[in-house]
Image (cartoon, rainbow, N blue to C red):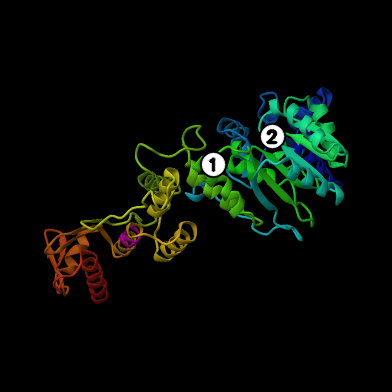
Amino acid sequence: MLARQHHETFSRRFAGTGLKVVHLSRMVGAAEARAAKEGLRSGHVAIVVGTQALASESVTFADLGLMVIDEEHRFGVKMKQALRNRAPCLHTLSMSATPIPRTLQSALSGIQDVSVLNSPPAKRRPVRTILAAFDPASVRAALLREFQRGGQSFFVVPRIEEIARVRDQLNRLAPELEVKTAHGEMKGRQLDEIMVGFANGDGDILLSTDIIESGLDVPRANTIIVWRADRFGLAQLHQLRGRVGRGAVQAIAFLLTEPGVELADSTRARLSTMLALDRLGSGLAISQRDLDLRGAGDLFGEDQAGHMKLIGAGLYAHLLERAVSAAGRRPGPDRQLADIAGLEKGAFPETYVNEPTVRVGLYARLSRMRSESDLDAFSEELEDRFGDMPGEVAVLLELTRLRIAASELGMAKVDVGPEAIAITLRNKPVAAQWRNSKGLEYRNGRLIFRPTLSRVSDTAAVRMALDAMRAASRVT
């Protein structure tokens, strides 16, 4: 359905240019499909809009140069790789309002270049989002309100098996409204007719599965009701919410749960994200939250979500950064943070961040901090999301701040002892230049700093050592 819509748009925009545009999907007849494939093979077709059918071995290209993967999150790893292998030197543009964790991680790590479109279309309004238990009277009121203002509504269920029961319930709740049904087990032609008809105003309610989530454009539809929203993922919910509010009319999304059923903490956190991030252009923020919750997956395998459990998120992020730098032949400095031994480590306690997956994500993000400004922004975000920081978190952030400062001064390791602080530099041959520095003593390839004040805390002693290094570096 999305391919057909894109084909119509491309055909209209490239009319009169001499560039032929064809469509290839299961909704295309056999004769039309054969003609499209022949045009691609001979080079007479300039642009083809299609589904995963383009990965078929029966499709060959005369000179394929650019591939655009729209709604990238809907494709698996094998399918995306098969599409990319259609030509030896193929420029690829992947597009998604909600990139999956694996894709987002590869973009944030520098494996893929990324561009972010933050400007919404003119006069577009944020979709008002409501989370509530299912209530028949409220559902009827919402559907009739949309009907009375001349609009249409979506009603989305998680499974095809539930459509018949829900359809009967909708007919009882709002018998004056016409209900249309759409799901993935319908034949292509039948499904296309229903969707095109609904977009043209045929029907008041479209009862469907999440098949409608990918880019479907129905301008008059400004109410969407998602039944059992707890069974959908973050990206799915954001995409479904994006089916309404595509004009200047205020749209509403109802996320309904089963009455009397207590939601798990992780599920409630996922749904609460939809309420908190309801502004226009919030897809990237939702994807980042999804990355925190589900993990980045396996960049060298087929898992598109999941946390690194064997080596830890921090080491994984560091190894990935080094690999990307080496692959890009970028000299880049060693950005590994200095190790400071002997100070209290701090932590994100369970009483402050109760979800284990979120804590893993926060530790991973903290390990990637490379400047005090980033750390300040991270600190403000923590207080906004979780409230006032307990002592353990303040200690953890202060330790990271010291590690950043030590790294900027060329330190690899700082060992804190009861009498002195031993400093190991990354570039050991340069250490000899510190021999005559005030407050620092050079011994066996390391610098030794002894605090001049008694009864000073270990953290304060490290700060004093850093100040001495800065003063000495200005002199040298």
Q: Which residue is mark 2?
A: 157
Q: Relative to residue 305, is residue 464 depicted above or below?
A: below
Q: Relative to residue 165, is residue 8 depicted above or below?
A: below
Q: Relative to residue 189, is residue 371 depicted above or below?
A: below
Q: Is residue 370 left or right of residue 415?
A: right
Name the residue type under label 2: Val
Pointer 2 local density, CA inside 10 Å: few below 14, some 14–19, many at least 20: many
The secondary structure type at the circle numbered 2 is loop
Residue 182 is situated, as x and y percent measured from the top left of the image, at: 77, 31
Q: Is residue 268 left or right of residue 124?
A: left
Q: Nearer the viewer, residue 367 or 68?
A: 367
Residue 12 is situated, as x and y percent measured from the top left of the image, at: 84, 46
Name the residue type under label 1: Thr
Q: Is residue 451 left or right of residue 223?
A: left
Q: Tell me the residue at 45%/61% (across/down).
A: 383
Mark identifier at residue 292: none
Residues in magenta?
A: 394-399
Residue 70 is situated, as x and y percent measured from the top left of the image, at: 67, 42
The secondary structure type at the circle numbered 1 is helix
Main SS of the magenta segment?
helix
| Residue 67 appears in the rendering | no
Q: Is residue 218 left or right of residue 446?
A: right
Q: Relative to residue 404, is residue 263 depicted above or below?
A: above
Which callout, 2 or 1, points at the residue further toward the start of the chain? 2
Q: Tell me the residue at 61%/55% (across/down).
A: 116
Q: Which residue is mark 1?
A: 267
Q: Tell me the residue at 70%/53% (across/down).
A: 127
How far apart, in angstroms, are the residues tagged by discs 2 and 1? 17 Å
Q: Quarter of the image containing the C terminus?
A: bottom left
